[in-house]
Image: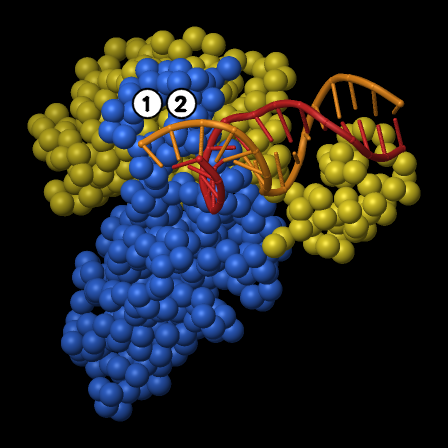
Chain colours: A yellow, B blue, C orange, D red
Amino acid sequence: MRATIYDVAKEAGVSIATVSHVLNGKGKISRERREEIRRIIERMNYQPSAIASALTSKKTFTLGLLIPDISNPFFAELARAVEDEGQRLGYSLFICSTDNQDRKVESYAALLRQKGVDGVIVGTGVDRLSSLAPLLERSIPVVFVSRECPDAPGIPSVVSDDYAGGAAAARHLLGLGHRRFAVIAESEAVSSSRERVRGFRDTLRDAGPLPPVKLERAVGIREGRQQALKLLRAPDRPTAIFCCNDLIAIGLLQGAKELGLRIPADCSVVGFDDTILASVTDPPLTTVAQPIERIGHSVIRQLVQSAEGRAFERERLVLEPSLTVRASTAPPSSLG
Amino acid sequence: MRATIYDVAKEAGVSIATVSHVLNGKGKISRERREEIRRIIERMNYQPSAIASALTSKKTFTLGLLIPDISNPFFAELARAVEDEGQRLGYSLFICSTDNQDRKVESYAALLRQKGVDGVIVGTGVDRLSSLAPLLERSIPVVFVSRECPDAPGIPSVVSDDYAGGAAAARHLLGLGHRRFAVIAESEAVSSSRERVRGFRDTLRDAGPLPPVKLERAVGIREGRQQALKLLRAPDRPTAIFCCNDLIAIGLLQGAKELGLRIPADCSVVGFDDTILASVTDPPLTTVAQPIERIGHSVIRQLVQSAEGRAFERERLVLEPSLTVRASTAPPSSLG
DNA sequence: CTGAAAGCGCTTACAG
DNA sequence: CTGAAAGCGCTTACAG
């Protein structure tokens, strides 16, 4: 069997309490003893069992990451940032893809509770806050990322400034000379999407009188393509379309191509997120870049602070997005 | 405090052993008692601590997934398949991105050991098998996925038939009428890449005398683009290029565009993997599809079998790839 | 069919 | 500065 704390205590001729103390840098141990014990630990290749230690100390140094789908590039990139910062702070990560289904959210929440995680990052849509009950009941720290839950006061969150992102998209397009716009948004239930649209529209409104902005809804590439076909076939075709995420924008690109339309010559398109997908399309997408890495790092720090009982710096951290201009936007070919 | 097994035992007027038995479906408990205890468990909302249970039973129902980078779409898609099947079988997943650095592999391996995982899936490159020592020493079950380690006899693996995939790419291109080929491969150290090239070349050789096949190396989009520029600028430009992964193929698409070349009219390109990226480029990529979902499911089953002490069905499971034909391949414009 | 008891490998007051 | 001892919440022979 592998070495336990008893083995090294015996070898060192001390009590297990002493070994535990040097392991955790607690208590006062004389320098010599400490170094002697360190050497023995090294020599025996002893590594404490995280399980036994969790049972007594109630800390597992493990976190849960609840997201809709790890195979979605946005969440995969977010997961990487979260993983890296977690690792730096000594935490491991359970990955939980929920497909935005409350049933799965709840079953993962119960599982994470049983496994004794120190905290949970929630990046998945949660219809009923009660899906998180297994966590909340046991006061396991939770922080939302990239989404918010209106009826969850007191739960901290880390988000992009979606309103500002939508506004940036509008300013870019306005600056290019566009005047006839459309938007393809996600579901009305998604708060981030609502904010993006609001920022976009408010900015247009401030720019003076403009033709009405058509709004369609989609989730993912396929629906994005369908809505694109609808919008692009209309007689008063918009010269610029703002899509609330890159997937929708990609669907739009595909729809436009089917219709023989050139992007950006016939229609400019702006996406949102700036995952790797945006750099790979043709033309590469102009898109509002979420600071995914900073979001991931911040959310972990927020959670760990809260798991370690320190006060939050803030309950809601809003990070600024920035516009990444690529080749899917240009001035309208016939101004007006 | 939350309820423990003692609380429900007291409530039910039985011993904790009895409660434990009904929890685990072990031992013989009279029907009435069993149902009575079930009701009490339900009512008290008791859920056993996975930590305490792991300490005694030595099983954590937790696995580690060691991959180069969760933000790489191939591994993200693989992770999703692994997660789903793991979940179905009752296992949670720690995600570990190693960037193919032995240092990180080793530190994650040590961490996973400490946390007492029941098994580890290794999809990351491992230069020295000794990086996995923390696992192997404790005989924690390991299975390789999508890569193999030649000096690791006895460690099971689940892979695509890379040779067959390379061959399929060659047959497709040959069938289209191509005769002047090039290949952009990954590093010679990557076994899967070697096999893909070998399958591709062998198939060409069997097709009769052909001009020599140029071979360049790249990893990722940027280098793929560079090698593409080199290949496409040469006087005897190939009419078809086989890339050992989709990322390289995407770089090639970008390089071709810069040179004003049309794909597939001026040059056909075949990728490998068929991640979401391949469906999003313009033109969409013809690519050898790895059965990512089946790979992920199989590797978990293989690992769980081994973790539960059952014999392997086989030590090496080889799944067949298939060619996904999209729009990046066509007959050469000037035959010959 | 059921229970008393040992044990898993740690941490943490507490006493000295 | 160091150790004896209790306790974390389970599982598992073993005895009856």
Question: How many residues crowd mark 1 within 10 Å: few (<14), some (14–19), many (20+)?
Answer: many
Quadrant location of residue B298? bottom left
| Residue corresponding to mark 1 | B37
| Residue corresponding to mark 2 | B14
Q: Is residue A168 visible?
A: no
Q: Quadrant of the C terminus of chain A?
A: top left
What amino acid is found at the position of numbered circle 1 in the picture? Answer: Ile
Which chain contains the residue that carries disc 2? B
Foreground of the two, A297 or A276: A297
Give the residue at x 44% y 47%.
B63
Foreground of the two, A17 or B194: A17
Give the residue at x 26% y 40%.
A250
What amino acid is found at the position of numbered circle 2 in the picture? Answer: Val
Image position, residue B16 (x, y; %): 44, 27
Q: Quadrant of the N terminus of chain A?
A: bottom right
Q: Is residue B76 above or below residue B16?
A: below
Foreground of the two, A94 or B31: B31
